[in-house]
Image: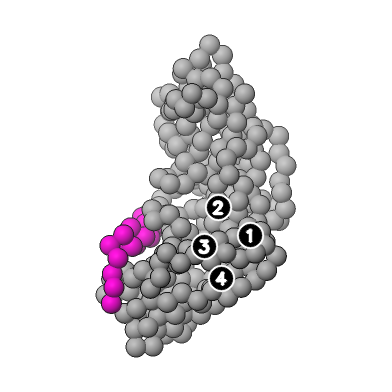
Amino acid sequence: MKKVTTARAAVLAMCAALVVGSAPVAQAQPVAGEGRLVAAGLPQTGDQLSYVQRGGAVQVYRSGERLADVRVASAAHPEGRGKLVLTVKAHQTFALRFGQFVWADATGDHDAVSPLRKVRIKGGTTESVSIRFDGVENGNVLWAPRRENTVGAWKVSARRIIGLSHLLSPSYVQRDAVVSVYKAGAPVARVTAQSAVHAEGKGALRLEVEVLKKISLRPAAFVWVDEAGERHRVVNARKVTVAPKTTRTLTFGYTDVEAGEVVWSPRVGVVAGAWGVG
């Protein structure tokens, strides 16, 4: 059995997801359908990837556009020899690396036998991908493209696979000015960056927050980055709680700012939204 210490970070991220999932977090309302949503507001910047797990499948987005669907088709571990089989439907050309997947059981955390192996699936095609592990037993399979954030989780019991999306932290998909937030695969809120103005160094960001469930937003997560790369946080703002089934407009103030962009990072390693400021 080979244990890779770096894999422990994925399990720590999973534990963090349990904590985050039970606390109020910044979340947004449902986006109708899967089509592109056009809204008035600040222009989208950046090219971040987003992941939303629904049941046993993870839908992957790039800049709000559907990139791929990744499903765990089967997972078996006869005599400790693990075989994870994924079905990958690529809407656009999509690549993944075996080392992004960790098999965590009672004996520890296990990386794939060939963690550096990378597969690329051509857009418009569906392929089966098999990943092998050594020394594994019943446990959880975690998908963590970046070790600090788990985007997919499944329970393996003999040959039975159960999606664990309810244990994951909220996920975010940006389309234009709107960021939709999902929990356990369901849309729960919507955050729209309506405007950002600045004059003589003083800036103001205006957000519209539509909520289905009670949520809280951390103003410190919205960072104003000017064209010189200087980062500016909100001035004297406290966490804001929004009641369920309500819409609220929030305004955050900044100092010493100029043209650039506003980046929303709800947790380490995750960019939920990025908007240009003229």
Instruction: Identify residue for label 1.
Output: 93
Chain-order first, disc 1 or disc 2: 2
- Neighbourhood count class around disc 2 (C-alpha, 10 Å): few under 14, some 14–19, many 20 upward: many
Pointer 4: residues within 10 angstroms few (<14), some, or many (20+)? Answer: many
Disc 4: which residue: 71
| Residue 242 magenta-highlighted | no
Of labels 4 and 2, earlier in sequence is 2
Residue bounds of the magenta highlight? 1-18
Give how far apart the Cα atoms at labels 3 and 4 are.
Answer: 13 Å
> Is any atom of residue 49 visible in this view?
yes
Q: Main secondary structure of the magenta part?
A: helix
Image coordinates of residue 71 in percent, x first then y, are 56, 71
Residue at 46 percent of width and 67 percent of height? 117
Identify the image quadrant of the N terminus.
bottom left
Circle 3 — which element?
strand
Confirm whether residue 241 shows in the render. Answer: no
Q: Secondary structure at mark 4?
A: strand
Q: CA distance from mark 3 to mark 2?
A: 14 Å
Q: Earlier in the sequence, mark 3 or mark 4?
A: 4
Name the residue carrying label 3: 96
